[in-house]
Image: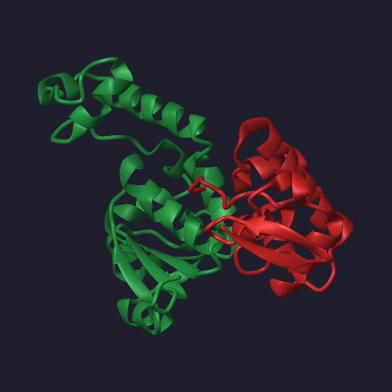
Chain colours: A red, B green
Amino acid sequence: MTTKEIAGVTIELDENGFMADHKAWTKEIAAVFAKEEGIDELTDRHFIVIEFMRKEFEENGTGPSIRKLNKQSGVSTKELYDLFPGGPAKKAALIAGIPKPQGCV
Amino acid sequence: MSEYEPIKKVSLVCSKGGLDEVYPSLIMANGARMEGIEASIFFTFFGLNAIVKKTHKNLKVATVGNAALNMAMPMLKMPITMPFPTLLGAIPGVSNFATWLMKNEMEKLDVPPVDEFLEMCEAAGVEMYACKMTVDMFKLSMDDFVPQVKGIMTVGEFYEKSAGAQIIFT
């Protein structure tokens, strides 16, 4: 476990560099993670994905599959790839403050 | 962190057309895109079954001559070590049943059916091509394929397209 100074607070990261405690997440933290991943600004569309992922994680203990996200959040697969270029599931999970996704699809 | 360079690009060759033979290519191509890896699939020989409009929704699991079908026995609440008799597999409807069973299990894992999976792959940026030689052999043309197929390619073009990629044959 490592820690990281981010948006003025110290947060704990798991062995994959994802937030160890999703409850410590704030929008400010999300913005810093997003910048590190090359996303300059988080829009409302990003937050639809982020909030859906957090809700899904709180209810099921794991992030959603892309298919589920697509069907239930109303963000299409294509848009998801545009919002989080270069690896949507992992990047969105990182920014949403939940662990690395476990599923394969 | 790994000491090796991350994979940047994969080219999958899908050469077989049973349901269980097509899924690996789709899952790996889509999975590559999820990791930010460039991915394409080259469908050849019976793998074309997965992209022909008239057949792609009806791919089957083979129940005759499938020596590893014992793997599916736990789905019938039987031990994984129990072989599935080929003669039984030849009875009409048994392959359909095995197919249904597998589709059902895949759905539980949130793996989409083939038609929806092809759409998802395209939306994710997977490029899909049909192999020219086998397209000619099976007397097919672009009109026979689902719209997600970008084109028909020769082996040479496939290798050109795969420059810098890891090639995976399934």
Residue A3 position (above or below residue B10): above
Residue sticking out furthest to the top = B77
Residue A18 location, quadrant:
bottom right
Measuring from the top left, give residue A52's x and y in whole percent: 75, 43
Q: Where residue B146 appears, x then y in whole percent?
A: 52, 53
For the N terminus of chain B, the quadrant is bottom left
Nearest to the observer: residue A77 or residue A55: A55
Q: Residue at x 52, y 58 (%)?
A: A15
| Drawn side of residue A90 relative to residue B12, left or right | right
Q: Position of residue B170 (x, y in %)?
A: 28, 57
Nearer to us in this view, A57 or A11: A11
Residue drawn at x 37%, y 50% as measured from the top left: B24
Residue B95 lies, with reference to residue B149, above or below; the image says above
Q: How many marks?
A: 0
Q: What percent of the width, then of the height, locates residue B163?
A: 40, 84
Q: Does residue B63 appear anywhere in the picture?
A: no
* Closest to the observer, B131 or A79: A79
Answer yes or no: is residue B85 visible: yes
- In the picture, measured across the screen, residue A13 lies left or right of residue B43, that is right
Q: Residue at x 33, y 71 (%)?
A: B167
Kindly indicate the quadrant of the structure image that contains residue A54. top right
Residue B132, above or below B163: above
- Which of the two residues, B16 or A104, is positioned nearer the viewer here? A104
Q: Is residue B92 left or right of residue B119?
A: left
